[in-house]
Image (tube, rainbow, N blue to C red):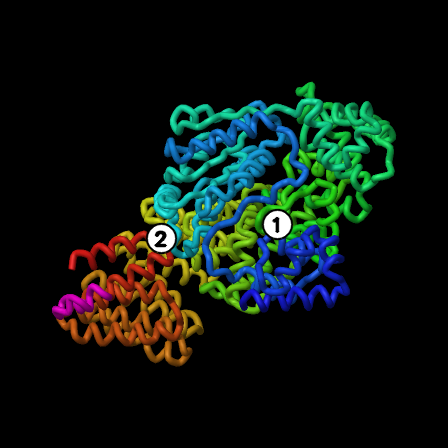
Amino acid sequence: MGEETFGALLRAARQHALLSLEGLAEASGVSVRAISDMERGRSLPRQATLAELMDALELDGTRRRRLVQAATRRADQVPRQLPPDLVSFRGREEALRSALQATDQVAGRGGHVVISAIGGMAGVGKTALAVHWAHQVAERFPDGQLYVDLRGFEDSGAPLDPGEALGGFLRALGVPSSDIPPGTEQRTVLFRERTAARRLIVLLDNARDADQVRPLLPVSAGSLTVVTSRNRLAGLAATEGAALISLDVWSREEAVTALAARIGEERCRAEAEAAAELVALCGHLPLAVAVVGAQLGEAPAMPLALALRELRATSPRLDALSADGRSEGVRAVFSWSYRALSAGTARFFRHLALHPGPVVSAEAAASLAGTEPVQARRHLRELTAASLLSRDAEGRYVLHDLVRAYGCELAAREQDDRLAAETRLLDYLCHNAHTANRFVSRFPPGPAGSPAPGTVRVEFDDREEGLGWFRQEESTAAAALRSLEDPRLLRHRVGLTLEWVGYNAVMGRWAEEVSAARTGLEAALLLDEPVTVARSSAHLVRALVETGRLDEADEPIALMLGQLDRLPVEHQVRVQRNVSFIRTRQERYAEALGHARAALAVARTLPRPDEVARTLIGVGWCLALNGEYEEAISTCEEALPLLRESDDRGSEASVWDSVGYAQQRLGDPAAAVTSFEKALALLDEVHDEYQRAETLDHLASAQLDLGDTAGARANWLRAADLLTALRVPRAAELRARAGEL
């Protein structure tokens, strides 16, 4: 779809909602001119703007997805990730002057400019200053802006891994997910290669320490890097030449000016003393002033003196800030804002605060609260208007950590059912992954079960929608596995890891899969469920193998084998096959053959010809690796009629691959080429890119034996490209073979 199609869809949605251009502008906060330009096909919205429009139109389901698809099909790869600038930004003249002076030095000194908000408690406005600064100078950096919240001070104590942040940056720069390497060091190298000739702004928000920041620094002389942190980050000044800018709370004059920007200068002048006392009660903390300003803006007739009396009558400050003499009344500010919410939105806010991640989608928020997405978006709009929420560049919702802490206090005080909310969130992540996997995963689906009542179900029409949902919820799934530790959620945690393994494998997210599989395995062991332990161990072993960490595979293999006597017979077969496969990758071929034969012995006791056939293939391959080539061919050929009966073309391709391998070793490379080509023809039908790469590798070797150097080189390069797309390190080995020719 192009821009004209988006404009037509937007116009149709507006007319369906019975809104004029002016009505939609008022409801969404987007200007009439901007909406008109979109409808006439002159422009496409940024993601945050699109989210505001769709929320104002109360779109859901298919209409929402169609509008998103039409708006996001852009030809350029210039990232625009900065959060929106605050219209009400005021003050900070000295700090902003220092920042702009530092910007002027970027090209000249060829280094990085770093802002570290060091005297700044939570809520002091570090992010607001950094974002405002970046917007002020954005035109001087034409190659775009990158932004990430590094979550350096989450209650969970688990800051964002630099590798995960780099993955987001690389995707924003146009690197397909399948081309992003698994390791942080490799991602850093690729990131610096991709940004070497670019003039970018990179905003690293809420950093924990210098070590978290360093892998994310570009090296181009024309780029500006801005870092915010509650720590001083003096190490960056020493090693990276960072310019440090300290922030404190506002002065009285700055705080009053900021309040006036939200509620009007005349109103503040009319009650100057009350305005000054209001901001003093906020401790001159920018976040608290913003919340008070939002509430007063919703009540234009309320005298400031009355607002002051009400604030004084509410609860004392947040315990987390009690050691700070400047922050008296912060909890009171939040309380006053909270009491102004409608009853439904207040309940929604308490549930929203339980979300474990830095950003939340409307669907995940709705699941936490057990409400419908349309109603959830109304609550989210009310919370955003009250400055209790903000939006990121992709339109998702962000809670400041102080606001989150206050919401969690309320949830505990109101005795909201935290376990039920977290269960719905995990079910949302698990069951929608199960649905999306119909289009995404190569793994056979397991039983889906039923999600808890109130869990939002998302519909998917194709692979791209499924992948889009996975990408949207990546950070939430990771945070849920990291933070939701209630023992009663163990089975949900295991289910989440098992449903997400297909996405991780398809996208080559092997490093992320190692972490997730370890979490799932720990939960499975606590549950003491043999089948789950075996499955989780198998997924962990596969991820370790694909990241080249073969030496770490023995421990989970031992766990798998330790469950054998407790497993149903069909699972015993799978465990032995899995172990056999890993032993082949470790070049422990005799052990691999032993496990393959053990699997076959058990498979022959089952009324499952397809299981027997797949196990025969494993035995045949191990025989070939052990030099028993003729027996390998006969064993593989025994599987062929069984596979054709079940129409298992992928496994039939494996037969011909193994046969070709044995034929080549028997001195008949021409016959081997024929067998490999049969395998490739079958693989074209089943779209198994991993096995296709393996077979191309074998074909290239046989072609080289026949003297076909050009054919061998071409097929090794094709195989390397496929493995690179799957982020498998062995791609480098195949590329090197091609280079030698």
* Residue 558 visible in this rendered orientation of the protein: no
Instruction: Identify the residue under disc 2.
Output: 546
Magenta segment includes 705: yes
Residue at 33% over, 55% down: 582
State which region is magenta: 702-714
Counting from the top left corner in percent of width and height, residue 400 is at 64, 37
Q: Nearer the viewer, residue 245 or 213?
A: 245
Q: State the image quarter where residue 120 is shown.
A: top right
Counting from the top left corner in percent of width and height, residue 647 is at 41, 78
Query: Looking at the rendering, in which quadrant would you find the N terminus?
Result: bottom right
Q: State the image quarter where residue 635 is shown.
A: bottom left
Residue at 79% over, 49% down: 344
Vertical arrangement, residue 273 with respect to residue 714, above or below: above
Magenta segment includes 292: no
Could you say which disc has been placed on residue 322 in the image? Answer: none
Residue at 62% over, 42% down: 486
Residues at marks 2 and 1, CA–CA distance in whole angstroms: 33 Å
Q: Secondary structure at mark 2?
A: helix
Residue at 65% over, 43% down: 390
- Is 273 displayed left or right of 226 in the figure? right
Which of marks 1 and 2 precedes in the sequence? 1
Q: Residues within 10 Å of mark 1 (few under 14, many from 20)?
A: some
Query: Looking at the rendering, in which quadrant would you find the C terminus?
Result: bottom left
Majority secondary structure of magenta residues: helix
Counting from the top left corner in percent of width and height, residue 233 is at 48, 26
Q: Secondary structure at mark 1?
A: loop
Instruction: Identify the residue under disc 1.
Output: 396
* Residue 347 visible in this rendered orientation of the protein: yes
